Image (cartoon, rainbow, N blue to C red):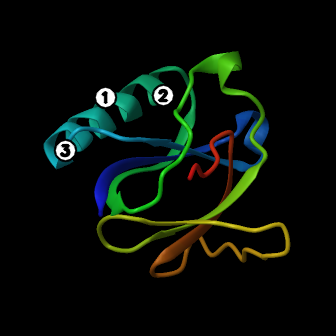
Amino acid sequence: MLKPVLVVLTLAPGGGATHLALSSPEDTAACAARAETVRGVLEGAGVKVIATRCAETDLSFTAYAHGEAQGPHIHPWRVTLPASGAVIEPLGATENCHPAPEATPAVHCALSAQALTD
C-alpha cells in the first residue's frame, strides 16, 4: 500500500555528500505543509537544500531523529526527481549509483541515517 513520504535532500556541511531524510506525514496536504516548513528551517540555518519533495512509497524506514540522535549517514540511496514526486531506492552493498543532478530527471546518490525496516 502506498503512503505519503517527505523526501529531503541536503548537502552535507562543507559541500560533502548528499544527505537524505525521510518522514511519513499523515497525508499529501500535511506533506506539502511540512516540506515548506522544513525547507525554510534548513535554509534559515544555512543548510544547502537540494530538494524537498512529497512522494508515495510502499517502503518502510526507520524514524527520522534530529541532530546527534540521528546517528551516522551510512545507508546508501538513489533518489530520482522527475517533474513531480520522487523515486527513492535503497541500495545494496554491491549496487552502484551514478549521480546525474543536471539530467532530466535528476538522479542523486545520497547517504542517510535511516534504513529500511521490515
The x and y percentages for residue 96 are: 78, 76
**Residue pictured at 63% horizontal, 42% vertical:** 114
Earlier-in-chain disc, 2 versus 1: 1
Q: Residues within 10 Å of mark 3 (few under 14, many from 20)?
A: few
Q: Position of residue 12 (x, y in %)?
A: 70, 39
User: Which quarter of the rendering shows the N terminus?
Assistant: bottom left
The residue indicated by pointer 2 is: 42
Which residue is denoted by mark 3 in the rendering? 27
Q: CA distance from mark 2 to mark 1?
A: 9 Å
Name the kind of residue labelled 2 in the image: Leu
Q: Residue at x 39, y 35 (%)?
A: 39
User: In which quadrant of the rendered view does residue 16 lie?
Assistant: top right
CB-based contact (under 8 Å), mark 1 and mark 3? no
Can you identify the residue that label 1 sits on?
Answer: 37
Q: Callout 1, which amino acid?
A: Thr
Query: Depth check: 25 or 81 in front?
Result: 25
Q: Nearer the viewer, mark 1 or mark 3?
A: 3
Say if 97 sits above or below 23 in the image: below
